[in-house]
Image: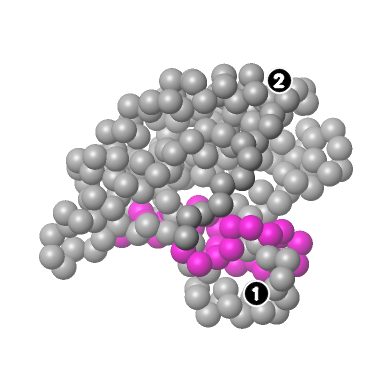
């Protein structure tokens, strides 16, 4: 009953070197903040700070993604960029096997919950809902913690480190230079897949396990 294991992925020398470079970066290999958060020892105020900073990134990422679309050297690249941008602002991906009407009905019935909407497919033929916007999911997380809309997502709420990251993202990820933009995309995708999401989820699960009886648990769908 063991799971079949396929052959290891074969990378070109350039891709292998790039992957090694990204994988061995200190932020990817050992992120002190994520490591600390995964222990579930954050206070309520520290969790609020994470939500606020993530909300600033979530909104400013839209500018970086739009910049990437604008500066794409090809129509195909621009369309790929628009897939991400449209999904971020609330267009639900349509899996290839589903019809648009079926997707719309299912999504509406489930309230465009981040736990159930598809993470694969295309925005082509997808359905839009304000409630499916990633930032609105973060607003739901913040609302449970007493944070109102005006306390989330604005540049003025960003820390120096958050704004440095977002500004660099706009400049490098959305660069007019194709090599620079592709390198940034490669690094971000592999960083996101390296496990920092898992550490955040682990931390929230531990914090939820310690919530007093009757206290509202942290929403997990966005993470």
Q: In the drawing, does residue 12 fall left or right of residue 146?
A: right
Q: Is residue 117 magenta?
A: yes
Residue 177 versus residue 35 in the image, above or below: above
Q: Nearer the viewer, residue 220 or 70?
A: 220
**Can I make out residue 172 in this image?**
no
> Horizontal and vertical percent for residue 178?
78, 26
Q: Earlier in the sequence, mark 1 or mark 2?
A: 2
Tell me the residue at 52%/39% (across/down). Answer: 193
Tell me the residue at 38%/28% (across/down). Answer: 31
Tell me the residue at 53%/80% (across/down). Answer: 109
Magenta residues (range):
115-144
Q: Nearer the viewer, residue 28 or 159?
A: 28
Residue picked out by circle 1: 103
Residue 137 versus residue 75 in the image, above or below: below
Residue picked out by circle 2: 13
> Horizontal and vertical percent for residue 16?
65, 23
Q: Residues within 10 Å of mark 2 (few under 14, many from 20)?
A: few
> Horizontal and vertical percent for residue 187?
59, 29
Q: In the drawing, does residue 21 fall left or right of residue 2?
A: right
Q: In the drawing, does residue 1 fall left or right of residue 170?
A: left
Badge count:
2
Colour setting: one colour
Q: Secondary structure at mark 1?
A: helix
């Amino acid at each position: 009953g063991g799971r079949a294991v396929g052959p290891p992925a074969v990378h070109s020398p350039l891709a292998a070197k790039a992957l090694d470079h990204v994988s061995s970066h200190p932020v990817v290999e050992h992120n002190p903040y994520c490591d600390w958060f995964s222990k579930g020892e954050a206070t309520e105020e520290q969790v609020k700070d994470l939500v606020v900073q993530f909300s600033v990134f979530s909104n400013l990422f839209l500018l970086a993604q739009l910049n990437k679309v604008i500066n794409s050297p090809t129509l195909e690249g621009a369309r790929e960029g628009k897939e991400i941008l449209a999904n971020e602002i609330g267009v639900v991906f349509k899996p290839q096997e589903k019809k648009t009407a079926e997707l719309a009905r299912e999504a509406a019935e489930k309230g465009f919950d981040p736990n159930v909407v598809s993470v694969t497919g295309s925005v082509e033929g997808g359905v839009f809902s304000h409630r499916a916007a990633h930032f609105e999911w973060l607003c739901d997380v913040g609302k449970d913690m007493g944070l109102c809309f005006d306390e989330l997502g604005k540049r003025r709420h960003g820390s120096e480190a958050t704004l440095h990251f977002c500004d660099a993202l706009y400049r490098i990820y959305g660069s007019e230079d194709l090599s620079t933009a592709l390198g940034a995309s490669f690094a971000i995708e592999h960083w996101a897949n390296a496990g920092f999401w898992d550490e955040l989820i682990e931390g929230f699960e531990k914090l939820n396990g310690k919530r007093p009886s009757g206290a509202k648990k942290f929403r997990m769908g966005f993470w």
